[in-house]
Image: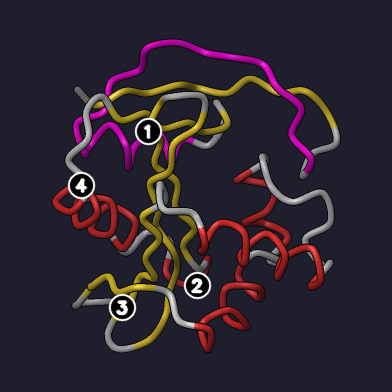
Amino acid sequence: MISDVTLRPIEDGDLDTIFEFSRDPESVWMAAFTAKDPDDREAFDAHWSKIRAREDVTNRVVVGDGRVVGTVACFVMEGDTEITYWIDRAVWGQGVAGRAVALILEEVTVRPLYGRAASDNAGSIRVLTKAGFEKVGTDVGYAPARKEEIEETILRLN
């Protein structure tokens, strides 16, 4: 059980671990809106290089008991600030995502802040609602991980 959760800036040395997390088939399925090919390291590196260079992105690695266990970020898309996170499946159910979200919400104070999750991803929706986000709608979009359009729940923190 993870007892201590902290955030820190992402370092080059974290990318191998983050890549491995992003390839886990069950995690990819739950996240749904993922890279077209989670095993494409070249595309992964290009994506991370681009987002790490953006000034409108707050990107943090989630450290649990001294080891990298995920990422959490806030970014601007189409004028709205959104939150996203990815937690190592090995620590799901231990409160890591909720603590990581709470920590980034202390750092990123822009409101409203939006979150999105596949509507069947009850765990992620629960993390966001516990952090104070409220469901404000749904959308349908193509989910590369599932190779089909699915419903997505949109949440907002005021």
Q: Give SS at disc 4.
A: helix
Amino acid residing under circle 3: Gly
> For mark 2, what is the residue?
90
Between tags 2 and 1, which lies in front? 1
Q: Residues within 10 Å of mark 1 (few under 14, many from 20)?
A: some
Q: Give me the disc on residue 105.
A: 4
Residue matched to label 1: 81
Height in image: 28 above or below 131? below
Indicate the position of residue 44 as horizontal and vertical percent values: 72, 65
Label 2, label 1: how far apart the Cα atoms are:
29 Å
Relative vertical location of residue 27 with respect to residue 90 in this rendering, above or below: above
Q: Marks 2 and 3: CB-CB under 8 Å?
A: no
Between disc 4 and disc 2, whose residue precedes? 2
Tell me which numbered mark, 2 or 3, is placed earlier along the sequence.
3
Residue 34, image x, y percentages: 69, 47
Tell me the mark number nearer the camera, choosing from 4 and 3: 4
Q: Left or right of 42: which side holds 2?
A: left
Magenta range is: 122-144
Q: Which residue is mark 3?
A: 64
- Residue sitting at the far left: 106
Q: Nearer the viewer, residue 135 or 120?
A: 135
| Amino acid type, residue under disc 2 in the picture | Ala
Figure quadrant of residue 123 = top left
Q: Is residue 12 above or below residue 84?
A: below
Residue drawn 41% across the image and 53% down it: 55
Q: Say which of 86 and 73 sits in front.
A: 73
Earlier residue among tags 2 and 1:
1
Amino acid type shown at disc 1: Thr
Image depth: mark 4 or mark 2 in front: 4
- Residue 136 drawn in magenta: yes
Among the two numbered marks 1 and 4 on one chain, the one whose residue lies closer to the N terminus: 1
